[in-house]
Amino acid sequence: MPEWPPVDHDTLLTDAREYARTVDVDVALDDLSWEVSTRAKRRAGACLYHRASGDVTIRLAWRAAERFDWNEFAAVVRHELIHAWEYQQFGEAGHGPRFKREADRLDVATTCPTFSVPRLRLYCTNTGCDWSADRHRASEVVREPEHRRCGRCGSRYEVEHVESGECWRTSAGYRGARERIEEW
Ligand SMILES: [Zn+2]
Ligand SMILES: [Zn+2]
């Protein structure tokens, strides 16, 4: 088991590649590419297939590496390795019977692995301060941010609705954002 969570993207990729060598699935690892996504908010992993070249890439979400413990993350790697095997062998992948057989054997879920992100995140507006906090409910802290301050340095903070990227610093801003956000 590697030191977890990884300190940077390269370490994450090294951990994933080394782990992949221990997984009993018939993937041509030398032909497989790996990358880290810093933008993925939902999907912990994805397997990409370039039909023309036959290239297969496993993309791992940095946020999932931060949130999952190693065992959970290892299951993500196994899940995507099965997709990689399917693409390499059959030129297609999915969650049908073929996937399920391998998934049962390797003890992984048959739906693509997701990780939950907080609905709301607070960020300090002071660039010298890296304070942030996660929230799920539209409490006063979220609805009326002008009445509260950063928990560390006392500056104003900004609220972000993570899924939509809408941000606000005032109650008027909150109301506007709330109208624009289709899926709260
Ligand atoms: Zn999947
Ligand atoms: Zn602050």
Image: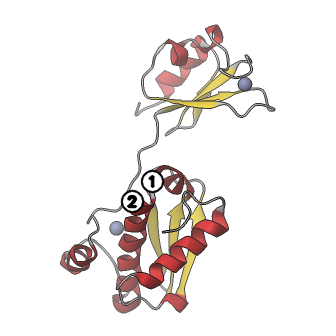
Which of the labelled discs sits on residue 72, or is there none? 2
Q: Residue at x 26, y 77 (%)?
A: 99
Instruction: Please report contact status of discs 2 and 1: CB closer than 8 Å, yes or no.
Output: yes
Which of the labelled discs sits on residue 165, or is there none? none
Quadrant in the rendering for residue 80: bottom left
Seen from this angle, which residue lies furthest right?
128
Is 18 placed above or below 178 here?
Answer: below
Is 146 placed above or below 30 here?
Answer: above
Q: Which amino acid does the dot numbered 2 rest on?
A: Glu
Report if residue 53 is visible in the image.
no
Quadrant in the rendering for residue 77: bottom left
What's the CA distance linking mark 2 and mark 1?
Answer: 6 Å
Q: Is residue 151 left or right of residue 48?
A: right
Q: Position of residue 148 (x, y in %)?
A: 63, 11
**Ligand 2: image quarter:** top right
Q: Position of residue 17 (x, y in %)?
A: 53, 78
Q: Is residue 66 left or right of residue 137?
A: right
Circle 1 residue? 68
Q: Residue at x 65, y 25 (%)?
A: 158
Q: Is residue 123 left or right of residue 175?
A: right
Disc 2, SS: helix
Quadrant in the rendering for residue 152: top right
Disc 1, SS: loop
Q: Position of residue 102 (x, y in %)?
A: 25, 79
* In front of the other: 10 or 179: 10
